[in-house]
Amino acid sequence: MTTPPTTEPRTPPSDLFDRFQPVIAVGAMVATFLLMPQAFAVSIIALVWVIATRVTRDRRFLGLSLTEALAWAATLVIVFLCLAIVLYIVAPPAAR
């Protein structure tokens, strides 16, 4: 006698979206850093999260709290700064 194969329950689309919200948020932060000056990008990210988490009842926006969003923004600042330093060491600007 054979047993029927077990299938894992499918996750509803809303749960799938909830799972990827932080990825979307960090991706939007990276895009903000690439499109705007660094100090302005941090200010925009902070402003968006302050407004979104204070206006709504839910204290999370795109799966991140205000503290988590600011921590990710600081992490991106550090990563981009280190990347700029490494690129400057590897390929310094041409001497004038």
Image (cartoon, helix red, strand yellow):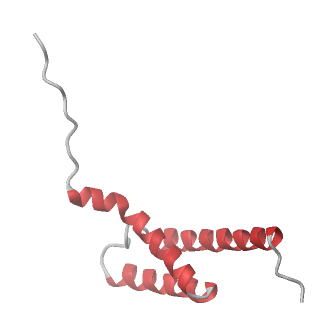
Residue 68 is situated, as x and y percent measured from the top left of the image, at 50, 68
On the image, the x and y values in percent for residue 69 come to: 50, 72
Give residue 83's position: percent from left, percent from top. 70, 69
> Residue 81 occupies which quadrant of the picture?
bottom right
Task: Classify residue 47 as left or right of residue 2.
Answer: right
Residue 9 against residue 24 in the figure, above or below: above
Q: Which residue sits furthest right?
A: 96
Quarter occupied by residue 55: bottom left
- Image height of 72 relative to 56, above or below: above
Occupied quadrant, residue 96: bottom right
The residue lying at 80 percent from left, 67 percent from top is 90
| Residue occupying the far left of the picture | 1
Quarter occupied by the N terminus? top left
In this image, 13 relative to 21: left or right? left
Query: Residue 43: x, y in percent?
Result: 55, 87
Q: Residue at x 40, y 68 (%)?
A: 24
Which residue sits at x=13%, y=18%? 3
